[in-house]
Image: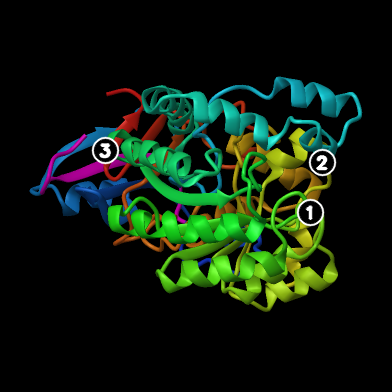
Amino acid sequence: MNSNGNLTLIGPFTQLISLSKLPLKGALRDEELEIIENAGIIYEDDTIVEIDKFDILKSKFSNAITEEHYLTNSSIAFPGFVDAHTHICFAGSRANDFAMRNAGKSYLEIARSGGGIWDTVQKTRQATIEELVSLSSDRLMKQVRNGITTCEIKSGYGLSVKEELKMLQVIDQLKQDSPIDIVSTCLAAHIFPKDYSGTISDYLEEISRGLFPIIKAQNLANRIDAFIEEEAFSKSVIRPYFEQAKSYGFDITVHADQFSCSGSEVAIEHGALSADHLEASGQKEILALANSDIIPMALPGASIGIGCDYTPARKLLDAGASLAIASDWNPGSAPMGDLITQASVLATFEKLSTAEVLAGITFRAAAALNLHDRGRIVKGQKADLTCFEVSDYREVLYHQGQLKPNLVIASGKLVYGPK
């Protein structure tokens, strides 16, 4: 839509939802939303220069505008959506797991019988880099069509130095070719690999000594994640691993409190950016998270896929915590991969305001990735926009994911919609 050094004007938007001045933590009311009617946006390259009434901007910048994108139909502008927790780099299907769960088997029973994460590990190991790039690219384009302009992608289906490196190289290639921003996370501590001959501590030490230096040297990721759970890693065994990660300067994030409570404690102990899942969190964990700087992250797709309770989002917000919402798109517990559908369903069950949902998939989700240059439509932020052809912003959640964006702009470039 524009080239380097050019000023672009886009609008008029029937409503522009800036999310300006909303806090990072705590409950939000819809009355706190800044809604600008008949709005326009001026941006230069990938950065927002100014927002105001469309006619005012057109007059003020009349001699400087080099490109104008005029909208003839009703349109709503949101900041680009941020999906801060996905596992979309994988091969294979886990339809059998889904069928077994619906027939009454638990997530842990399926894992113990040879299904679950280990099944995906084997299929992902068998796939070539080219195959994984192709599969992941297709999923990434679905994200773009759903209005995602920043997408986190985890490794975690390699579970060896060699195979985790392969996954991270795939994600790095996706970064180079993707129309949207990708944040890479190393999840080598996903589960303990069934084919590893040593102890859990041996495995974690091998990963930290063998993989961390390569990741850092090749700039393949700046985030280390771990699954703290009975079938994965305990809070005691993960401590040296996270300490080693922090010594390299990695950010920490944690799969926490999905089936039992201890992961949120680990997240707090190690100063994690986010604690993700939290379906099992009780009042003790909720208050501890609210009193920390950690961003709790709800993953409603996993609750839908497994059939378990939702993250106690309402209680977290009312206690003063932040709340990000992500899709957890993965082949096992969350195969849907539709952030707006999941966020809309979570809002219904947890009684979240539209403002809380929008914050959870924009600037609060970005902060969980340690990104503070996006998630709001304000001067100086990235020109990331997700637009819908409706006249009322509330229509988007009302349609529960069936209403799709008609226009997506990432870093000032049109990545989806009419040219």
Alpha carbon separation for disc pair 3 and 2: 44 Å
User: Which label belongs to residue 363?
Assistant: none
Of residues 101 and 206, which is closer to you in this image? 206
> In the rendered structure, are the residues bearing label 2 and label 1 in contact, judged by CB atoms less than 8 Å apart?
yes
Alpha carbon separation for disc pair 2 and 1: 9 Å
Q: Residue at x 46, y 39 (%)?
A: 163
User: Which label belongs to residue 230?
Assistant: 1
Of residues 131 and 272, which is closer to you in this image? 131
Q: Residue at x 47, y 24 (%)?
A: 127
Work out whether residue 100 can be spotted.
yes
Which residue corresponds to mark 3? 413
- Which label lies toward us, 1 or 3? 1
Mark toward the start of the polypeptide (2 vs 1) = 2
What kind of secondary structure does the magenta stretch mostly adopt? strand
408 within the magenta span: no
Amino acid type of disc 1?
Answer: Glu
x and y, in percent, of residue 151 in the image: 45, 43
96 vs 255, left or right, is right
Which residue corresponds to mark 2? 108
Amino acid type of disc 3?
Answer: Lys
Of residues 382 and 167, which is closer to you in this image? 167
Q: Residue at x 67, y 65 (%)?
A: 237
Task: Please provide the residue range marked out in magenta.
Answer: 1-18
Query: 301 above or below 103?
Result: below
Mark toward the start of the polypeptide (3 vs 2) = 2
Which quadrant does the C terminus fall into? top left
Label 2: element kind:
helix
Alpha carbon separation for disc pair 1 and 3: 45 Å
Query: 284 above or below 114?
Result: below
105 vs 251, left or right, is right
Label 1: element kind:
loop
